[in-house]
Structure formats: C-alpha cells, structure tokens
Amino acid sequence: MPAPPAPAPASSRPSPTSRTWDVTVVGAGPAGTTAARVAAEHGCDTLLLERAAIPRYKTCGGGLIGASLAALPPGLPLNVRDTARAFTFSLGGRRERTRISASPTCAMVFRSELDAALTEAAAAAGATVHDETALTGLDQRDGTVTLRTNRGESLRTRVLIGADGSAGRVARYVGVQCAQVDLALEAEVPVDDRTAERWRGRALMEWGPLPGSFGWVFPKGDVCTAGVVAARGNPAALRAYKEDFLRRHGLLSAHPLHDTGHLTRCRRPGSPLSRGRVLVAGDAAALVDHWSREGISYALRSGALAGRAAAGVVSAAGEAEAETVTRHYGQRIDDVLGAEMRASATLMNLFARTPSLVHTALTRLPPVWRHLDAYISGRSSVAGIMATPLARTAAALGAALPARSAQGAR
C-alpha cells in the first residue's frame, strides 16, 4: 500500500483560522475520514482534525466484514493481511468446531493502515488534514460552531462532525447515552512460521466465562491479533480470562507489539445524534453491534450519512431547513443502523443467557451457520437473521430462561 502523504509541519500549514470552514470533522478513524471525504466530494470546504500523528495505532480487532468492505471507497489501496475462510467456535475452550465460509470476505487489516488509507482518500477528495491537533472546546451560535484546539487556535465552521470516539468531547457535547459499555483487552502478538501457518485463513471465536464475553484470534500473517471482551465492571476477572485465553492458544508473549484495552459503547435507543449544527457518527455516536462489538461497518456507513447531511446543512436556506436536515440524518441512522442494533441487542440477550444454546446452534445446525456466514460476507444483516422464525423462537426461549452466572458459564 502506498504510504499516505505526510501532513505538513505545523509551522508550514496554512492557518485554519483564516476562514470559516463549511465542514470540520474531528477524528480520523473510519467514520471521520469517510465523513470528510463525502463532504469534500459534495463540494464542501472541509477540515479533518486528528489528535494523534497519522498513521497512528488504534486498538481494534481489524476484521472487515462484507458490510465494511462494501462501504469503502472504490479503489482504496487496502493492505489485507489475511482473509478468514474458516471460523472456529468453542465454548470456554471445549466443544470446538470449525465452519468453512461459502464466500470468504472477512478481511484482516491493521487499523493504522486502514485509517491512513482512508485519510489519504479524504485528502484526495479535497479535504484538508491536520493531525496532532486535538479539540479542547466548542461553542455554537448564529449558525457557526467555534472550536478551540490544543494549538491555541480558534476555528469557525458551519457544521461540526464528531468522530472522536465514544468518550470524546463532541459526544459529550451532543449528550450521547449508552445502553451497554464493555471492556476489551487486546494484544498484537508476533508469531513464528509454524504458528502463522496454523492460523492462516482461520479466525477463532470462543464464548468466555463471563456473561456476554468472548475471546477472538484474527490472523494477520506473522502477527495474530487476539483479545477478550466482556461487560465493564470486573476488570480483574477479564484480565485473568485474557491471560488464560492467550496461554491456551500459544499467544501469551512476553513481547507483544501492542497490549492495550479500550471501552466499547452501544447507543441507547433514542439517544441524540445531533445538537444544532453538531453531528456525531461512528463510535462517537456509540454505534456498535451489541453482540459482536463490531463497529467498523457502523462507522463507515454513519460517516457517509454524516458527510451527506453536513453538505445539506451547509446548503440549507436558514436554520429551519438545517434543522430538518439534521433530523433526517438521525432518522436515517435509526432506520438503518438502529434497526441493526436493536436486533443485535436481542441476540446479545440470548447469548448472555444461553451461550451454550448459541454455540450448539452455530456448530450443529447448518442453517444457523449459513445465516451467520451470510452476515459475515455482507449478504445479510443481524436484523435479517433475527427476523427468521428459528431466531425468533430462540430469542423467546432465551428470554424465558434465567440469566446464567459467570461461574455457571464454565
């Protein structure tokens, strides 16, 4: 993959304070870069701000399902490290079974490389990119949003899109509320040739000992990305599970490339997606799948919707029309991604109560695996899966059963 253009040194950059931007985007992840690219493609004078130096490391499994791949800009030079053709499922390290994808499309990437490529695409569309620039404050009045940065700058913009993460300043300003908060612990582990060959083309999902938890291994050539996730609140137990999980799979390294953790947040239905001329997208809007905690496809799709909405606000004839545009943005998010999240919340409830039922269905009932395979490849959605008679019956059964305990999960 060609290296992204290096951002200009701060001293040589044109001052972003010298004019009012049409659209400013905060955060150069999949949501922010997509929003900036789409806004620029619609003719908006667009500024993209990123607090870190690009390229930068981002804690993320880095598995691109079909919905993510379909949402990428055409011709993006994507550095795919591996493609998962086989998926191994286990229940706490037992009852392991591997399923083969009918149309393998789950591409394994490093987020630093993906985000750099998306940033380059935004710049190629005409967006101005300033990295190492953090938002420190914002205010809006009279159709203009004023931003303050760590560089002492005061920027003006007609629309602000927050894509700075679920704990970011813009999300707090808009008032995003969460229904589910999870802690993920992850390591990127260099592996020898024999281990790399063992994992090549195969991803692992293990249902873990804590309610709603699982562990994963994603192959990326001479590196495996592995981690565990569970509801926030018992970090010691999650750390113990991570160490056990990595040890059992031969990935407990004394020198991982990265060993980090982060919170994932799922939006509460009805939570705001805008405040005046300020919109949120991706993780900043807490758009994440409740069950798989997959967020890249949500980020790319919401970023595109936010970029188009921002262009509509810029061209609006007055505040009433601008408000209509932002309201329509929220409705589109709810109609498409909100429906997905509601379905995934139902699936998460079923999984948290009866992980053994979910495991048995995936590994022993071919129609269930075919539905999940269709979702992974982008031929279906979680909402489509949960609308099937089998899923509706299972969800009703799961709702009637008592929730399992963490001890009973073993």
Image (cartoon, grey):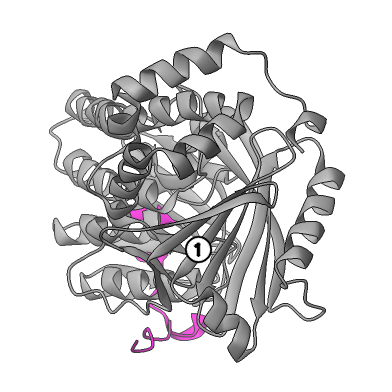
Which residue is depicted at the point 60% across and 26% down?
354
Nearer to me, 260 or 318: 260
Residue 16 highlighted magenta (yes or no): yes
Residue at the spot 57% in from the left edge and 44% down from the top edge: 169
**Is residue 209 shown above or below 297?**
above
Q: Which residues are magenta?
A: 1-26
Q: Is residue 138 visible?
A: yes
Q: Is residue 311 left or right of residue 303?
A: left
Residue 361 lies, in percent from the top left, at: 46, 35
**Looking at this view, is 264 or 120 the one in front?**
264
In the image, taking residue 257 as reference, residue 117 lies left or right, namely left
- Residue under numbered circle 1: 203
Which picture quadrant has residue 362?
Answer: top left
Quadrant occupied by the C terminus: top right
Q: Residue at x 82, y 32 (%)?
A: 407
Q: Residues within 10 Å of mark 1 (few under 14, many from 20)?
A: many
165, above or below 367, in the image: below
Give coordinates of residue 73: x percent, y percent: 22, 65
Residue 39 rendering spot, x and y as whole percentages: 22, 55
The amino acid marked with disc number 1 is Ala
102 relative to 24 in the view: left or right: left
Q: Nearer the viewer, residue 25 or 314?
A: 25
Residue at 78% x, 47% y is 238
Q: Quadrant of residue 179?
A: top right
Q: Where residue 274 sits in the image (x, y, percent)?
A: 39, 31
Q: Is the residue 201 above or below the residue 394 in the image? A: below
Residue 56's quadrant in the figure? bottom right
- Is 239 on the left or on the right of 230, as rendered? right
